[in-house]
Amino acid sequence: MVQITPDAEKFIMELLEKNQKTGYGIKVYLAGMACSGPQFGMSFQQGSAEGDTVDKSATGFEIYYDEETGKALEGCIIEFVDDPNFGTGLTIRDPSFSGCSSCGGGCH
C-alpha cells in the first residue's frame, strides 16, 4: 500500500475538486531513475487500467500504479511540500534512501 500523508491527501482532494475531477483518482508512474533514486510522475485517472494496483486513500480517492512502479514505491511516502525555494506540490520520498557515491552522497 502506498503511504500518503494527511496534508498530501488534502492537497490531492483539493486538486480533484478544483479541476472538476469527481470520481477520478491519481495515477502514479515511474518516470525514470536518477542519482536520487526513482523519479515518479502523477496524473489524474478515472478508474484503473489493466494491470493497475488500486489503493484507497483515507479520504476516499484511489491511487493507481502498475507493478514496476509499485516495486519502486516500496517504502516511499507521498508528501505535500510548501517550500519557498522549491515551490508547493507533491513529492514522493524514500526516507531510507541515503544518496549515491557518484555525487558524493549529497543527493536526496
Image (cartoon, grey):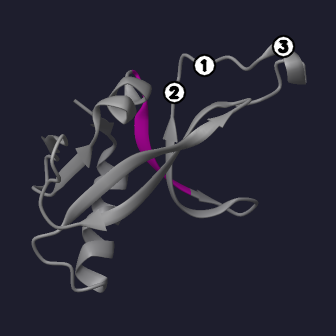
Q: Which residues are magenta?
A: 75-81
Looking at the image, how many numbered discs can be counted on the residues? 3
Q: Give residue 98's quadrant in the image.
A: top right
State the residue at coordinates (37%, 30%): 68
Q: Give residue 101's quadrant in the image.
A: top right
Residue 72 image offset from top left, x and y in percent: 44, 27
From the image, tell me which residue sits under label 2.
Answer: 94
For mark 3, give the secondary structure. Answer: helix
For mark 1, give the secondary structure. Answer: loop
From the image, tell me which residue sits under label 1.
Answer: 97
Residue 87 image offset from top left, x and y in percent: 65, 65
Q: What amino acid is at disc 2?
A: Asp
Q: What amino acid is at disc 1?
A: Phe
Is 68 included in the stretch rendered in magenta?
no
Tell me, for residue 101, which label it has, or none: 3
Disc 3 to disc 1, how far (Cα)? 12 Å
Report if the CB atoms under discs 2 and 1 are less than 8 Å apart.
yes
